[in-house]
Amino acid sequence: ELPFSESYKIKMVEPIRRSTRQEREQWIKDAKYNLFNLKSDQVFIDLLTDSGTGAMSDRQWAAIMMGDESYAGASSFFNMKNAIKNILGFDYFLPTHQGRAAENVLFSVLVKEGDYIPGNSHFDTTKGHIEFRKAHAVDCTIDEAANTELYHPFKGNVDPAKLEKFMAEHSSKVPFIIVTVTNNTAGGQPVSMECIRQVRAIANKYNKPVVFDSARFAENAYFIKMREKGYESKTIKEIVREMFSNADAMTMSSKKDAIVNMGGFIAMRSEKLHQECSVFNIMFEGFITYGGMSGRDMNALAVGLDEGTEFSVLETRIKQVEYLGEKLKEYGVPFQFPSGGHAIFVDANRVLPNIPKEEFRAQTLGIELYLEAGIRGVEIGAILADRDPETRENRYPKLELLRLAIPRRVYTNNHMDVVAAALKNVFDRRDQIKKGFCVTWEAPIMRHFTIHLERA
Ligand code: F0G
């Protein structure tokens, strides 16, 4: 049998540059040990996020040229509307400038002070928009997700028993149930169709809508095809349609699985909800036929939704993530297993157990990896978990992860080899890393983006 290879060839390239360790020491100090503060040319391989960092296809660039920039009623809006209807099955939608804007608009209608929004792990902006409204995000993810060594095919799942118990006690304060596909916070882990059906059944019992946070819905569908019985011979588009048939509404960050650099949307079945959201969309985002997006970007998004739900595109992508995972396994570097759809999440609790959790293990590992080879990951740990909005105490999540998110169609497996080798070097000298970091300044909410740190 022939080896596997990418389902595309490359038409345009962008140079990147290696730096010296000495340069990086200075740059990261100047950045107050916050990886978000680095300039992109101070980074060699950028795995900060897979959001908006993908390479568009020739078809997408062609669609850009055909963008209709009319303020109202642009053909690009209708291209996007048709793609959403055909691929996801929703009759109504509103464009927004990105995923968190979709959350802002939808939650302005649905979330009130004192509400509870249960689901699997909420993404940080989702939680931010909930807590900003003095409501509570309730994480009902299965316990298996917290054990990085354990294999589970659908580690992103909602635990139906936890959800049912919560609903039995608090359903009067629950405006909707949210399911994030894939579950980014738990390690880019998928949610099974069986679980989606179980959530739907619980929602029906309590007469509540289900909202999907859909940033990586196509990667989720790929895992269902590969791992769930009965879906082996279905197409990704068939699986996607079935997934969304269980949702009443969705928010989308199109910067992930729709492979555009900017954009998002809300889609829904209810005309009434569409009308209610339109008011906020016009206030926050723009008129309802562009909502913060250029016509050209809506066009590229429509094509991206189609391409992003093709098996060959997903197979190429997810196999690259698996490739990095395999290398790390070979080197003994612990990570959330199995590898996720968009990223590898290195288990910093197991790499740096001797650093006190108060000194931010995953952040420390991230800084070390940057110093080692100019590779930028992102902390998914106590800094991101932020303070409890009521007690203002630091929250220490079960997992301290360093996420290495892989942009779509951007890096080759040679780059993955460099990432794996650099991480191995850090791992091999882990006993010499004895101190972490402490905070010198932080913002009152979503502090991780702008935090200032110094060596402890
Ligand atoms: N939901 C999920 C699951 C996400 O991963 C993100 C963004 C959002 C919502 C918000 O979308 O960025 O377009 O406003 N995740 C990026 C990341 C930023 O790096 O994981 P956005």
Image: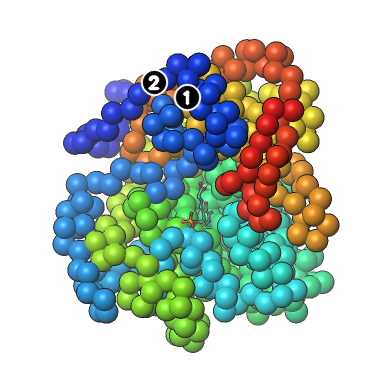
Q: Nearer the viewer, residue 183 or 38?
A: 38
- Of labels 1 and 2, earlier in sequence is 2
Q: On the rendered image, what quadrant is the N terminus found in?
A: top left
Q: Could you tell me which residue is drawn at 75 percent across and 70 percent down?
A: 167
Q: On the rendered image, what quadrant is the C terminus found in?
A: top right
Q: Could you tell me which residue is drawn at 61 percent across and 38 percent down?
A: 379
Report the residue marked by disc 2.
Answer: 18
| Residue 319 vertical position relative to residue 278 in the rendered view, above or below | above
Q: Is 322 left, or right, of 196 in this rendering? A: left
Q: Amino acid at mark 2?
A: Arg
Q: Nearer the viewer, residue 357 or 438?
A: 438
| Residue 168 vertical position relative to residue 225 in the rendered view, above or below | below
Image position, residue 194 (x, y; %): 58, 57
Q: CB atoms at circles 1 and 2 under 8 Å apart?
A: yes
Q: Which mark is residue 374?
A: 1
Q: Amino acid at mark 1?
A: Gly
